[in-house]
Amino acid sequence: MSVLLAADSLELAYGDAPVCRGISIEISEGEIVALIGANGAGKSTTLRAIAGMMTPRAGSIMFAGQDITRLPSHERTMLGIALVPEGRHVFPFLTARENLELGGFKNRRDNAKVRRMIDEIFDVFPRLRERSGQNAGTLSGGEQQMLVLGRAMMSEPKLLCLDEPSLGLAPLLVRDIFQTIKAINKGGTSVLLVEQNARYALETASRGYVLQTGSITASGLCAALAKDTRVREAYLGRAAAKAGAA
Amino acid sequence: MTATIVAQQAINGIVLGSLYVLVALGLTLIYGVLVQINFAHADFVTLGAFAAYFVMHALGGQYLLGIVAALLVGAALGWAINITVFAPLRRKGNELLPLIATIGVSVMLQNAMLAWFGPVPYAFETPYSQKVFRVAGTFFTLQSVIIIAVSATTIALLYAFMKFTFLGKALRAVAQDRETAGLMGINPNTLIMLTIVISSALAGMGGAMLAPVLVLTPFAGASVIVKAFAIVIIGGFGNVEGTILAGLLVGLIESFTTQYLDPGLIDIVVFGLLLLMLAFRPTGLISERREENV
Ligand SMILES: Nc1ncnc2c1ncn2[C@@H]1O[C@H](COP(=O)(O)OP(=O)(O)O)[C@@H](O)[C@H]1O
Ligand SMILES: [Mg+2]
């Protein structure tokens, strides 16, 4: 498998406040990679750097063989990186359909293709078809999560970055969302999955990184990470840690 | 008799109001997309008026080409103020500086116009001001017909652009969430430029059609812009439909106040309404929804 994304020794900061130090992450083509860690560890910041919403202080990011370290986010989207940001960020006063259309901004000169892709997304999420003419801001949290997933897929990404897709969703919906993520991955899209819900993330992904106060403290196959006592204690709850030790 | 007076004032009010709409829409679009106020907008109106005046006279009375010239001058001014003021200051990340800088640009433009055109008012007579129609006791000039036709077409085109085209939707997306628009592959800077150019073109065009009504001096735009600000606030900052409604409303208030009260009371009535709005309906006529969505 060839390397799709390689972030090397990223130093990330907001103003003068350093947040992430020496972050190195690799994602191969076709892989689902999880990035887990406690609240405030720097997961969202890492994703923002990969999507081009902030420029690293130091380090480099290669994507599909190209140095993208200094590219703005809209150019990275054109190259095939899509980010579903934390908190969803639908365009609240555009209709659900218009949100999807904008996801396909790359293909704006091919209206037929955009329509076809929207239909495909409506087939995956029939709820969205029912809601297509409604302002996205009026959709429920679950519907909005489907919408932003669909919107990201409209740009036909090679790499889909998801920031806490399960946050605030009912347990039943969480299951659906992770199923969908797996289906998207089967379609050939690599996925970088950020989750506080470490259990689901480690079940869904094949490899994972553990981020702790701005540094990567563990990485490897998810099966191995799930057995790691420190990971279990910190992210899978006490009961799991005891069971693992026993 | 009274019915014809009412109809007559309604026509006058709509003619004036549609011009206010053109000027106010520019302010509201820039606010909606950038959360900035362009204080030089008034001077773009004035420069549009002068452009129309000189082009019309140079071409022997071609007023419609004068309007086109004003539109182009406005667009060019918008382009210029974005590359000199808004874009560089945005990169600095300061929110207050652009506002102050546009006040500086405004003072500069006014003094430049004073130097070029002098303080004496220009008489702007278009070939269409003298052609009068009478319909059912009311009368209107060909000039008013042109004003209504040009403004209505412009507003309809702008509305269709925002509602139905990919670029128009992208512009609304940038207004709602600039960072997320970037994630869609939209270059926000391009759309901000487009917004300022369109807004300024509207101001220039509005100036070309307001000039025959106003006293054309280097300060002509200032009297309009105060009302345009009131309209933007009454319509709800950044709200296009609200601005259209409020612009027509202020035009009507102005013509009926002139008829039934006293022309000197126009500003008092308009700003009275503005204060009432701020007190009781601060989100504007069509209260859209500006609360953050999570
Ligand atoms: N816009 C910002 N400005 C300043 N500090 C920020 C900003 N966003 C996040 N931070 C800080 O950066 C750290 C990491 O945040 P974040 O990447 O959001 O963590 P996570 O996604 O893992 O919860 C936190 O300490 C947070 O307070
Ligand atoms: Mg986060």
Image: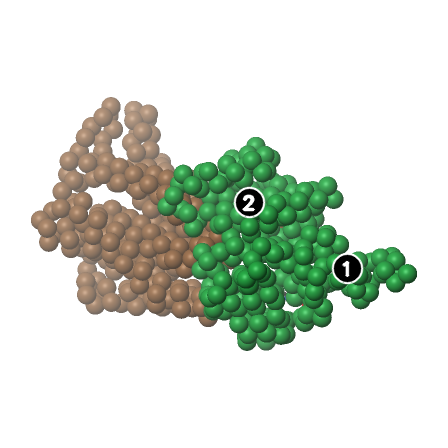
Chain colours: A green, B brown
Of the pair A120 and B70, the residue shown nearer to us: A120
> Is the CB of mark 1 within 8 Å of ligand 1?
no
Task: Give percent across and percent down for residue A19.
Answer: 64, 71
Of the pair B149 and A146, the residue shown nearer to us: A146
**Which residue occupies 88% across, 63% down?**
A245
For the residue carrying disc 2, how many other residues have a C-alpha within 10 Å: few (<14), some (14-19), or many (20+)? many
Tell me which amino acid carries mark 2: Gly
Q: Quadrant of residue A146?
A: top right
Looking at the rendering, in which quadrant would you find the C terminus of chain A? bottom right
For the residue carrying disc 1, how many other residues have a C-alpha within 10 Å: few (<14), some (14-19), or many (20+)? many
Q: Earlier in the sequence, mark 2 or mark 1?
A: 2
Of the pair A109 and B214, the residue shown nearer to us: A109
Tell me which chain the residue with mark 1 is part of: A
Callouts 2 and 1 in the same chain: yes
Looking at the rendering, in which quadrant would you find the N terminus of chain A? bottom right
Q: Which mark is residue A150?
A: 2
Task: Give percent across and percent down for residue B158.
Answer: 35, 43
Task: Give percent across and percent down for residue A192.
Answer: 61, 57
Q: Quadrant of residue A35?
A: bottom right
Q: Secondary structure at mark 1?
A: helix
Seen as rendered, the residue at the extreme left is B60
**Which residue occupies 10% across, 54% down?**
B58
Tell me which chain the residue with mark 2 is part of: A
Q: Is residue A154 visible?
A: yes
Task: Give percent across and percent down for residue A175.
Answer: 71, 44
Tell me which amino acid carries mark 1: Ala
Asked whether disc 2 touches disc 1, contact meaning CB atoms under 8 Å apart, the reply is no
**Which residue occupies 17% across, 40% down?**
B129
**Which residue occupies 25% across, 46% down?**
B209
Residue beneath label 1, please? A226
